[in-house]
Amino acid sequence: MPTVVIASPKGGAGKSTAAIILGTELAHAGAAVTLLDCDPNRSLSLWASRGPLPSRITVLSDVGEGEIVRTIKRHDMDGQIVIVDLEGVASRLVSRAISQADLVITPMRATTLDATVGVRALQLIREEEEALDRRIPHAVVFTMTRAVRSRQHSGIETSLRDQSVDLIEPPLMERTAFSALFEFGGDLRSMPAQGNMAAAIGNAEDFARAVYARLTAEDA
Amino acid sequence: MADKPFSVDLGRLKSREKDRSAAAVERVDRTGEELGFVDRDPVKRRGRKPSPRTGQVHAKVLPHVAEEIAAEARRRGVQQGVVLEEAWALYKSLESTAD
């Protein structure tokens, strides 16, 4: 089963939020999901400690660079999706995790700084593809976006499309419910209502569908 | 949101064959290092770890007992080991008496 690596050397880009949303939505849709918390800030572990874990989800904490390859190998089995949440730095752990990915997702806020730093992950993926002689599918998802798209957002999006970067639609919008996952744990369906829950669930589900489509694409 | 509920067909999810050999990991490390993706694991402390019981590296007794043994050794002008050996001899004799 596929390994999805959430990677960006930029901190605060929304990696852990994207990992939890993707993991909980895929689990809700019937997949067994193993989330690997490789971030020393232990954001996934914090989320896991806040409330009962949703069905079909397992969280493994404190996976370091020495264990990442064999931990992914151990969980990369039939009927299981592995999602790796990485720290927001340029580290060897990041490059090793990417080498084991079936899909790398780079969350990116629609700011010049996030785009500039986030692009380093895309460069690393390209170099690793060459070193390993295999294609590593990757995509960017914009995070914390607003209903009204800024000019900066449009400019960055155009620039990435011009470079043939795969952009996941829909982006993950800035939503109270998404940040509240770290307060209540569980998933969007189990937490007390936070803002427009139907819209949040719809956004999360469509994002997971878009990722699933990439994982099941013929050339994936 | 799409009308049809989202459900995952596990049979359609594929994992690709990945090279997990030491040579492949080394190639990946080298590639990453060239782009600044370097080892950032915290440096492990070398040497013997402090005892979880006493918090000391070499001592076998709690700190206040170590101080008392040291004070007694100083008073008598002998090595601390002598005090420990005498204590052990005393323990053995008590043990044989109990038998």
Image (cartoon, coloured by chain):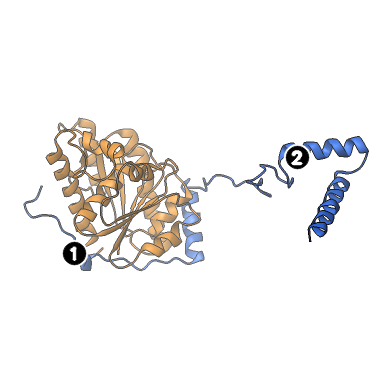
Residue A211 seen in this snapshot:
no
Assess disc 1: are there few (<14), some (14-19) or many (≥20) residues with their C-alpha within 10 Å of its C-alpha: few
* Left or right: residue B80 compared with residue B61: right
Q: Which residue is mark 1?
A: B9
Residue A19 coordinates in the image, percent (x, y): 30, 47
Identify residue type, mark 1: Asp
Q: Which residue is mark 2?
A: B65
Q: Vertical placement of A150 versus B27: above or below?
A: above
Residue A206 coordinates in the image, percent (x, y): 16, 48
> Residue at the location (25% across, 45% down)?
A141
Image colour for chain B is blue
The chain carrying label 1 is: B
Q: Are marks 2 and 1 on the same chain?
A: yes
Q: Secondary structure at mark 1?
A: loop
* Left or right: residue A18 compared with residue B45: left
The chain whose colour is orange is: A
Residue A145 coordinates in the image, percent (x, y): 22, 35
Nearer to us in this view, B80 or B72: B72
